[in-house]
């Protein structure tokens, strides 16, 4: 299994450098299994929101898309999906992920 970092996902999601985005997407497709730690999700949301001024709806869509890719395993996927739902409803993503990871309800 290959663990990936935020930079690779940012390239694919933003397509800010088409050559790098194509290489990153090809790399992901070549892997049998890809692991995304929760810390990468946290950083990804922050980078998209802060550096790229990506709107909440687009970030929600990108995060949800990651959880549906056939060869992707997200750390604590149940908590991640819950956090995405809360984020969609206006909760700060980091707060949502921390609370969901603790098994709490908002």
Image (spheres, rainbow, N blue to C red):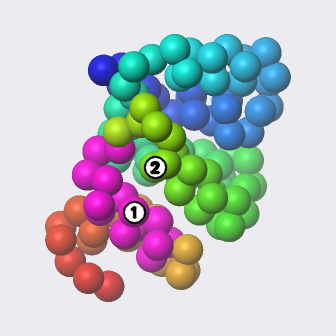
- Magenta residues: mostly which secondary structure? helix
Q: Is residue 81 magenta?
A: yes
Query: In the image, residue 24 lies at what x, y percent?
Result: 62, 20
Q: Secondary structure at mark 2?
A: helix
* Residue 43 in the figure: left or right of residue 56: left
Q: Residues within 10 Å of mark 2 (few under 14, many from 20)?
A: some
Residue identified by numbered label 2: 67
Q: Is residue 78 above or below residue 12?
A: below
Q: Which residue of the protein is positioned furthest toward the bottom in this rendering?
A: 106
Cα–Cα gap, marks 1 and 2? 8 Å
Visible residue check, residue 43: no
Q: Position of residue 27 (x, y in %)?
A: 56, 15
Pick the quarter of the image with the N terminus.
top left
Residue contact between numbered discs 1 and 2, judged by CB atoms under 8 Å: yes
Asked if residue 78 is among those painted magenta in the image, a careful observer would answer: yes
Using the rendered image of the protein, determine whether residue 56 is visible from the camera's viewpoint: yes
Say left or right for 72 vs 103.
right
Horizontal and vertical percent position of residue 91: 48, 77
Q: Which residues are magenta?
A: 74-87
Residue positioned 46% across, 73% down in the render: 85
Quadrant of the rendered image containing residue 7: top right
**Quadrant location of the C terminus in the rendered image:** bottom left
Residue at the spot 53% in from the left edge and 56% down from the top edge? 64
Which numbered marker is on residue 104? none
Q: Which residue is mark 1?
A: 81
Disc nearer the start of the sequence (1/2): 2
Quadrant location of residue 2?
Answer: top left
Which residue sits at x=50%, y=41%? Answer: 69
Q: What crowding class fits label 1: few (fewer than 14 Cα within 10 Å), some (14-19), or many (20 or more)?
A: some
């Amino acid at each position: 299994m290959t663990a990936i970092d935020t930079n690779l996902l940012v390239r694919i999601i933003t397509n800010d450098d088409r050559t790098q985005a194509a290489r990153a997407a090809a790399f992901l497709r070549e892997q049998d299994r890809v692991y995304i730690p929760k810390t990468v999700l946290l950083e990804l949301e922050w980078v998209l929101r802060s550096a790229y001024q990506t709107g909440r709806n687009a970030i929600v869509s990108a995060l949800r898309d990651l959880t549906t890719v056939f060869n992707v395993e997200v750390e604590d996927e149940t908590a991640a999906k819950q956090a995405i739902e809360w984020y969609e409803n206006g909760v700060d993503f980091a707060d949502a992920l921390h609370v969901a990871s603790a098994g709490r309800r908002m």
